[in-house]
Image (tube, rainbow, N blue to C red):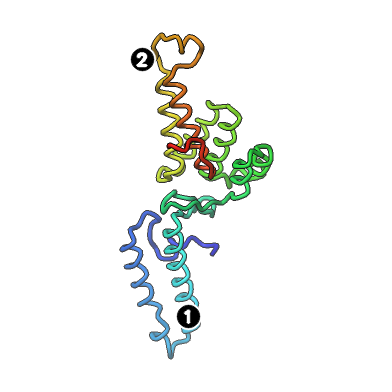
């Protein structure tokens, strides 16, 4: 459906399930065909009732799959709920998973700026992280979380990177023989955890114990 299903029911995208059900019942009662049997508005009521039913079914499907509707771009954002990954960019994720970063980047570059949602920035972050450009990756992850604050997948990766960065601040650094070589044991551990999280987001597993 091209229209925002939430606007059809007259509810906010943050409405509770009960509020959505209540709005649906009110509209269904108003436009039920039985009320227009002898009315010239019968056909219009039937069309409206069909639109209401489709909108309600669409919202139920989106919530079951863990998606939210982005009215600014007319796309769906994955919220990371339910344990399954639903994505607007399956090919990009597959390319990143298989290490074909240039191919993944080519697809993302082809997305118009007005259509770039939170997942677009998250996947840009994944590409940059895989290339070792952690500062740029962090910026993309941060933007993804700002655009989709409820997304568990995005938030987990950003939190891991925040943990990694916190160990490198002056108040956490200690002079050790390992640090003298440019990397402390904390740096190594936190970086490994972050890499494992990012890998798992792409369908793999770097550390079997995590």
Residue toward you, 38 or 161: 161
Within 10 Å of disc 2 (Cα), the crowding (few <14, some 14-19, many 20+) is few
**In which quadrant will I find the N terminus?**
bottom right
Query: Would residue 9 appear left or right of 140 to someone viewing this image?
Result: left
Within 10 Å of disc 1 (Cα), the crowding (few <14, some 14-19, many 20+) is some
The secondary element bearing badge 2 is classed as helix
Residue 15: x and y in percent read 35, 57
Q: Which residue does the image show at 49% across and 39% down from the upper left?
A: 144
Q: Earlier in the sequence, mark 1 or mark 2?
A: 1
Measure how far apart labels 1 and 2 are at the Cα level: 67 Å
Residue toward you, 69 or 66: 66
Residue 79: x and y in percent read 44, 49
Which mark, residue 133?
none
**In which quadrant will I find the C terminus?**
top left
Q: Residue furthest front?
A: 208
Above/below status of 160 relative to 73: above
Of marks 1 and 2, the one in the foreground: 2
Residue toward you, 63 or 110: 63
Q: Quadrant of residue 10?
A: bottom left
Above/below status of 40 relative to 184: below
Q: Which residue does the image show at 43% across and 51% down from the upper left?
A: 83
Q: Quadrant of residue 38?
A: bottom left
Residue picked out by circle 2: 171
Pointers 1 and 2 in contact (C-beta within 8 Å): no
Residue picked out by circle 1: 46
Q: Which residue does the image show at 43% across and 26% down from the upper left?
A: 190
Above/below status of 93 relative to 7: above
Residue 170: x and y in percent read 39, 13
Q: Residue furthest bottom?
A: 38
Above/below status of 59 relative to 98: below
Give the number of marks. 2
Q: Which residue does the image show at 42% across and 10% down from the upper left?
A: 176
């Amino acid at each position: 459906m091209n229209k925002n299903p939430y606007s059809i029911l007259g509810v906010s995208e943050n409405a509770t399930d009960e509020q959505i059900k209540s709005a649906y019942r009110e509209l269904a009662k108003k436009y039920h065909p039985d009320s227009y049997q002898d009315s010239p508005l019968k056909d219009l009521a039937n069309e409206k009732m069909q639109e209401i039913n489709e909108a309600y079914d669409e919202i139920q499907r989106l919530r079951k799959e863990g998606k939210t509707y982005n009215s600014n771009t007319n796309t769906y954002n994955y919220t990371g709920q339910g344990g399954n990954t639903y994505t607007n960019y399956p090919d990009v994720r597959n390319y990143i998973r298989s290490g074909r970063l240039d191919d993944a980047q080519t697809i993302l570059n082809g997305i118009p700026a007005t259509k770039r949602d939170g997942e677009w920035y998250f996947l840009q972050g994944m590409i940059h992280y895989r290339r070792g450009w952690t500062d740029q990756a962090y910026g993309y992850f941060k933007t993804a979380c700002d655009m989709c604050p409820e997304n568990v997948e995005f938030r987990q990766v950003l939190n891991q990177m925040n943990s990694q960065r916190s160990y490198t601040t002056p108040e956490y650094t200690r002079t050790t023989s390992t640090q003298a070589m440019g990397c402390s044991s904390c740096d190594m551990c936190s970086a490994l955890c972050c890499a494992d999280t990012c890998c798992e987001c792409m369908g793999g597993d770097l550390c079997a114990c995590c």
